[in-house]
Each structure stands twice: as C-alpha cells, then as structure tokens.
Image (spheres, helix red, strand yellow):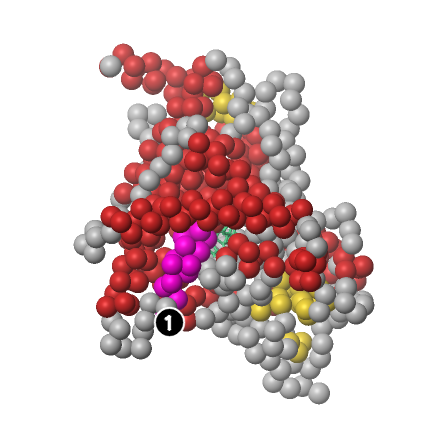
Amino acid sequence: RMSAHGSGEPPHLPALPLIGSLLSLRSELPPHVLFKELQVKYGHTYSLMMGSHSVIVINQHVHAKEVLLKKGKTFAGRPRTVTTDILTRDGKDIAFGDYSATWKFHRKIVHGALCMFGEGSASIEKTICAEAQSLCSVLSEAADVGLALDLAPELTRAVTNVICSLCFNSSYCRGDSEFETMLQYSQGIVDTVAKDSLVDIFPWLQIFPNADLRLLKHCVSIRDKLLQRKFDEHKVNYNDHVQRDLIDALLRAKRSAENNNTSEISAESVGLSDDHILMTVGDIFGAGVETTTTVLKWAITYLIHHPEVQRRIQDELDRTVGDSRSPKLTDRGSLPYLEATIREVLRIRPVAPLLIPHVALCDTSIGDFTVRKGTRVIINLWALHHDEKEWKNPERFDPGRFLKSEGTGLTIPSPSYLPFGAGLRVCLGEALAKMELFLFLSWILQRFTLSVPPGHSLPSLEGKFGVVLQTAKYKVNATIRPDWARHKCQENQCH
Ligand code: HEM
Ligand code: PLO
C-alpha cells in the first residue's frame, strides 16, 4: 500500500540488540568501500543499526539528491556523537551543529565574511599568490641542491596562512613554533574525530579509558587555547569601523545583537556566546586547512602517477600564461585542462567520502522507503563517484572525461558528482577552495615538473579513511622547468 511516507522499509543488514549491525560491518575495508560493496547484497539504499541508532546508507545519486536537495530541509539535521561533541562543545559549531536558528545565523555571517574578504575583493587573490610565491621559492631552493622534499608541511603552511589571514588577519613563517603545534594537534584530531570508533556507537564506553578519546581531548584543549588567545587579542583591539577578518565579523554581529536588547534578540539567544564564536572559527580554520591541503596532496600524487597529464597542463600554461608573468584568477577560463584535472581529483578521491552524516528532522521518505524521524543518513559520495553505471572505468584517472568531446569546453558528464555536497548543508568554502587549488597548482606547474626521486616507488593511491580521506606520506623531486630557469636568470640579472 502506497502512502505519503513511502511504502516500506529499506532492506536492512542483520542487527543484534545493543551492538546493532556491528558484526556485518567488521571488515578490512574502509567504510566507504565496504558500504559500496554491500550494495551487491542489499541494493543501493539500505539500512543498518549502529548501536541503538538507525542508519540509512545511500549509494546512488537519485536518492542522494532527494535527501540533499528535494528534501534538504527535512534532512538538514546532524547527529550528536561523543567525539564531535568534544571537538565542538556539544555542537556549537556549523558543520557538526544541528539544524537551528543559531546554525543558520552563523552560516550567514561566515558566508558574508568570505564574500567580503574572499570572492569580492582582490585581496584574497593577493594573499594566495603571496603564499604560492613563498611555496615556490622553497621548492626552488630544494630543486637547486637536488633535494627531495615531503611537500605536506609546505602545502599545509601555504593553505594555513590563507585561512589565517581570513580568520585572524595573521600568518606564520617557516618553522614558527605555534605553526608546528598546530600541525600536531590537527593531525591528532583528524586521526580520532568522527571515525565512528566504538565510542560513537556506544556513548557509555566513554567511562572507560580510551586512548583515542584521550588523544582527542588533549589535542582539542591545545586547539582551544590557541583559538581563545586569538579571540582575546581581537576583543582588545576591536573597532566597530574596521573589519579585519572573520573574528571581527562575528564580534560585530555580537555587538549589534547586544545593543539591540530592546528586542528579543540577545547575543545569547541568537547563539553569539563566546563558545559559539570560538567553535565557528575553529570549524572554518579546521575545514579551511585540512580539506584544501588534502586535495592538493591528492592532486600532486596523481600528477606524479600521470606525467602526461602534467605535461598537458604545462603546455596549456605555456600557451596562455607564458613565462613572463604568474597565473592569476582571470586565467581560469583559459586553462580548461587544469580545471578538468582538479575536477577529476575531487571525483576520484573525494575529501569527505561519506560527507557528514545527516539526520531526518521528521517522519519522511526516500524514494519508496519510509524514514522515521531521527534516522541518520549517510551519503556515500565514494559510491556516487565510482558508480560504474555513471563513469566509464571509475578507478582510471582521466581529466578528459570533464572536457567536451569537440574540444576545449568543460562539462560535468554525470549527475553522480557532488564533491562539495549540495543543498542547505553544501560546503561553505567551495569558492575559496577552488581559488586556492587553481592558483597553487598553476603556480607550481608553471615552474616545476614533479616526480618521485630516482629509485623510489610511486606513492600509494590508497586513501586512509578518517574525517577526511588522507594520502600517504612520500617525497617529491621538484625539477625547475628549462624555460622557467632561463626566465629566473634574466630576473636575477635585473637586480
Ligand atoms: C562541509 C567538501 C573546503 C567549510 C563540507 C561537506 C563537504 C565538503 C562534502 C559536507 C556536506 C554535507 O554534509 O552534506 C569540501 C571540499 C573542500 C572543502 C572537497 C576542498 C576542496 C572547505 C573550506 C572551508 C570549508 C576551504 C572553509 C573555508 C565547510 C563547512 C562545512 C563544510 C563550514 C559545514 C557546512 C554545514 O554543515 O552547514 N565541505 N570542503 N570547506 N565545509 Fe567544505
Ligand atoms: C579538521 C581538524 C581540525 O583540527 C578540526 C576540524 C574542524 C572542521 C572539520 C575538519 C576538522 C575536517 C573536515 C570537515 C571540517 C568541517 C567540514 C569538513 C569535517 C575535523 C568536511 C570535509 O566536511
């Protein structure tokens, strides 16, 4: 019998009391790969139990878009978990905070601040280019003495400084001790948060000592001290008329809510407590660093595996930008192959292979399936991006699939592509991330060719699952391109 809320339950994995479907989920495979494989037995949309929570897993784009777009508001909730509660002071942030007036308000302020300092003005482009310059000079020094380099810390510093400038109006030099601290705590958080470790399934396990949880708490406390210090410094120098960065934007919103205490809107009631502000900044800082850095690392990993792709991007750069100036954002339209390569990297190794879990805020349905209020929904972006019905040879790295067959135009060849999610919970940093990816990669490839040092094997393409899908660690040889070396000599003669 059909009803407004669907006609039946989705197929479900066997479940036991208390532990739920844990036994069927024990596997060597990372969760996104396992969830994709389970389709063979259960179909593309199925349910399972995590402890006492009912979870629906979606592996196909029609249902994914129903959840994110068509019924976006119904599915805009977030679950609370033990680890994200530690990270975000019980969901007082944007990414892990539940759907609420506070969440909406914070998204709006961040969006405004990113537009103001980001897309709208030229200054963010200048900041990114200054960091690209500094990154390239480190690569150049290493190239001069033939030194192979782990690029990860250099890429992280470049990306961190862009987001530092947006959030705190500050930046780090090489070897800065605060920066080293940040690298360490952030790795600790990435390694432990939201990986559905046992504690997220059984909250009562918290009372037992748990090494992951201890590490997470330690790292979060270091992060919070750093955020608090930046916040306090801003409060001291705050001026209503100058908006230097995101913290100023949030402080200003807090001020105007406080001055408006004639109305019902107090700073507390719209969620502008110090806790909320700190957690929002922590989100943007964390998301701003870990995601973009990870994509850059994946891009370089694939470029090393595919020297022919590197050469084609370099040809494109030589033809359109040349070697007498550096790439800028307005070149984006004339570098379609680079753009296609970035899209392909985001497809083949999505940063957030399971997005962040969504929650049904009321009784509803997905396709013909009934979904009860409170059900958690996992969108398996990995399965969407590797769907054999949608992508020819999904594990093959082929930027060409994003180019129109007749020539140079760009296209998105399948609706099964959502690297930034979609709908109400769509990524807040998409525009910023795309600017950074384009500028950093174009600056690097204009000047250098990347490869593994002689005798080293190619870096692994297998991702390490966590709150972001991480790359392996490996060393890279950056060789200065012949044309650029000549250019650099001329430049030096001028000085
Ligand atoms: C959420 C991808 C960079 C801030 C997300 C989500 C994805 C995503 C898939 C989850 C959507 C969902 O749960 O439905 C990416 C990728 C990036 C990137 C692929 C880089 C290439 C950034 C940057 C920032 C940022 C640079 C900050 C400036 C956020 C925030 C959320 C989010 C705040 C939570 C939104 C919410 O729950 O309302 N991102 N992101 N992201 N992203 Fe990004
Ligand atoms: C990364 C480690 C930081 O120390 C804290 C942090 C904050 C926001 C998180 C981010 C981490 C990982 C990537 C997340 C981001 C919010 C949105 C983004 C989850 C945990 C994605 C890709 O969804």
Categorize mark 1 by other alpha carbons within 10 Å: few (<14), some (14-19), many (20+): few
448 with respect to 353 (left or right): left
Residue found at x 30% / y 49%:
234
Q: Residue at x 33, y 33 (%)?
A: 130
Q: Secondary structure at mark 1?
A: loop
Magenta-colored stretch includes residue 451 = no
Displayed quadrant of residue 278: bottom left
* Image vertical order of residue 31 relative to residue 301, above or below: below
Name the one closer to the observer, 361 or 416: 361
The kind of residue tagged 1 is Ser
Task: Give the residue number, with chain letter if any, for mark 1.
Answer: 269
Position above or below: 222 against 421? above
Q: Give above or below for 79 relative to 436.
A: below
Picture coordinates of residue 444 (x, y %)?
43, 30
Question: Which residue is pictured at 33% across the width and 40% down the height?
Answer: 170
Asked whether residue 344 appears in the rendered view, the answer is no
Q: For the N terminus, which image quadrant? A: bottom right
Count of numbered badges drawn on the protein: 1
* Whether residue 347 is situated above or below residue 149 in the rendered picture: below
Q: Residue at x 31, y 46 (%)?
A: 233
Q: Position of residue 331 (x, y in %)?
A: 34, 40
Q: Is residue 313 left or right of residue 374?
A: left
Image quadrant of residue 37?
A: bottom right
What is the x, y in percent for residue 375? 63, 71
